[in-house]
Amino acid sequence: MLKRLCLFTLLALLISPLSAALAQADPFPNRYVAPDAGFTVYYPIGWTAELSDSSVTMSSGVIWLNVYRVVPGEMGISPDDGAALLERAYNPIDTTIAFDPAGVIAQPESGRRIFTYAYEDTNENGPYSGFVVAVEASDGSYLLADIYPRQGASVAQADLDLSLDVLRVPHALRLHGVIEHLPQLLHLLHLLRGYLIACLYRLHPALCVLRARHQLRQHGILAGDGAHVHAG
């Protein structure tokens, strides 16, 4: 009986921090499936995503992302040609601003290609700066995105980095489906924790007394030595 009690106690203690850790494990819990665009995006809480023709328009409230999928071979482009890919994504409002292939930067990334290009443009609110990026997928296709400010006149480096993380996620392994089913897993852990706690109280009635004393102390009804606290 004592071994069983210790086991239940250990499991109950472990499940609480495990649940909290799993809740924080996925920074992109939201999913938007765009079959017409040919891909799925995962994005942070607070972001929005909606289909616009054959692309997905996303927003963090601070920046915009217009994302679409391309297959280089279908366009007669080499997968290594980041400049050609980004030129396809480059669509300035001010058409007099030419694309400069020398400005393309290949981001260091193991196992996949990521290209970025910073540009200057002008809209009805005046000059602003943005990025066009290309993130390679495991199947050889790319997600191309135009990233530009919704607030202010530029895209902060932190927002660019977060956007690149969002574009990486659709083609990641996603922990073999664990993260994808995280809400269900957390619900099961919560139910299991409640069951284990109930078992503890049934196996050891003294725990019920200790729990009641603890709750009374929390509400100021019982003093630390077990004496009742009287007002006035």
Image (cartoon, rainbow, N blue to C red):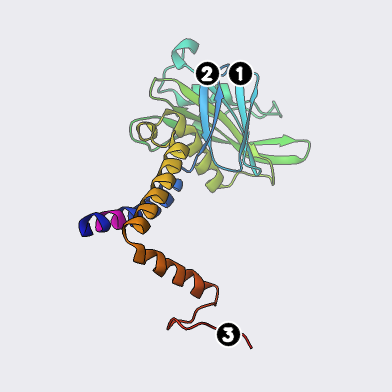
Residue situated in front as seen by the camera: 228 or 41 = 228
Labels 2 and 1: the sequence-earlier one: 2
Identified at 46% across, 16% down, the residue is: 72
Image position of 96 (left or right of 26): right
Identified at 44% across, 38% down, the residue is: 182
Location of mark 1 (residue):
54
| x then y, percent, for residue 175 | 36, 35
Q: Is residue 25 visible in this depiction of the protein?
A: no
Residue type pointed to by label 1: Ser
Circles 2 and 1 in contact, beta carbons < 8 Å? yes
What range of the chain is rendered magenta?
6-10
Q: Nearer the viewer, mark 3 or mark 2?
A: 3
CA distance for labels 3 and 2: 69 Å
Location of mark 3 (residue):
230
| x then y, percent, for residue 200 | 34, 56
Q: Quadrant for residue 122, please give it.
A: top right
Location of mark 2 (residue):
38
